Image (cartoon, rainbow, N blue to C red):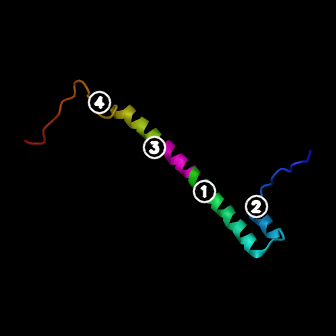
Amino acid sequence: MATITRPRIVIEVEVEDLDLLEGVSIALSDLAVAARQGLVALAIGVGLAVVDKIFEEEVSWLVGVRGQQVAGRVGLSPRP
């Protein structure tokens, strides 16, 4: 059986050290930057979704469930 080597993670500095064509090096560097930005965007999106859910729960806890009638509440008219 043939041995399969594990893939290794290549950082931008290592890409420059490899003996590749200039176009391939630039493409790999751009790909690494895009992947890094994609992960950051994913992390930010998940974080904002979590904060949104926390805020919704806090609002429900403070003022009650949205659309639910509150017994004993009296509405006031703004007219004198």
User: In whole angstroms, how far apart are the C-alphas of marks 4 and 1?
Assistant: 40 Å
Q: Quadrant of the C terminus?
A: top left
Please state the horizontal and vertical placement of residue 60, each as a whole percent of the image: 38, 34
Q: How crowded is mark 2: few (under 14 residues within 10 Å), some or many (20 or more)?
A: few
Residue 76 position within the rendered picture, expressed as x and y whole percent measured from the top left: 15, 36
Please tell me whether residue 28 is drawn above or below residue 58 in the rendered image: below
The residue at 54%/46% (across/down) is 46
Which element type, helix, strand or loop, lies under badge 3?
helix
Residue at the image point whose x is 32% and y is 35% from the top: 66
Cα separation, mark 4 vs mark 3, equals 21 Å
In the image, the segment drawn in magenta is 43-51
The residue labelled by disc 2 is 11
Q: Distance between the residues labelled 2 and 1?
A: 16 Å
Question: To which residue does mark 1 refer?
Answer: 38
Instruction: Tell me the quadrant of the picture where the N terminus can be found.
Output: top right
**Of the pair 16 and 76, the residue shown nearer to us:** 16
